[in-house]
Image (tube, rainbow, N blue to C red):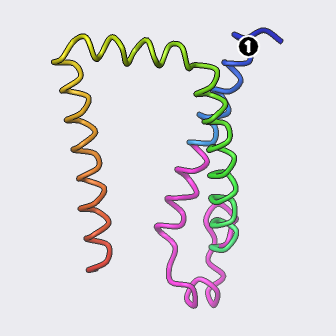
Amino acid sequence: MGRRLTKTIIDVLLLTGLIIMGITGLGMYLAPSGRVARETHWTFLGLDKSTLGDVHTYFGFVMVAIGVIHLTLNWKPLTSLLKNLKNSGSDMAKVVLTLMLVIAGVFVYLNTLGRA
């Protein structure tokens, strides 16, 4: 199997995992509390709350492993991109600002969950 085909397969697996993680994450977010979910036999796409959590967790582990493989296969392009960003300061500032905003947004979101 050629390197290009391997990279394509890894990318498709990552995209598939992302979609599954998104769907199961949405199902877990929409799920009622444990007792209500059990007593009403609540399901999301035919999966109960516990199974959704299991599928989400397993695909999370698989995606971490596939992500490591993806980074390994794309290490040279990644380092080249980072070198180019380092040389153009304004692009690097945009990337850093975007990352900071995303991280701040995640912290704000997580803090509001605790107060609901």
Return the x and y of residue 21 as percentages of the image width and height.
57, 50
Quarter residue 65 falls in: top right
Q: Is residue 37 magenta?
A: yes
Query: Magenta region: which residues?
Result: 19-48
Q: Nearer the viewer, residue 84 or 97?
A: 84
Residue on which the image places disc 1? 5
Quarter residue 55 falls in: bottom right
Q: Is residue 82 left or right of residue 15?
A: left
Q: Is residue 53 left or right of residue 6?
A: left
Tell me the quadrant of the picture where the N terminus can be found.
top right
Q: Secondary structure at mark 1?
A: helix
Q: Is residue 98 left or right of residue 113?
A: left
Q: Residue at x 55, y 88 (%)?
A: 36
Return the x and y of residue 88 as percentages of the image width and height.
21, 12
Q: Residue at x 61, y 86 (%)?
A: 40
The disc labelled 1 sits on which kind of residue? Answer: Leu
Q: Residue at x 60, y 36 (%)?
A: 67
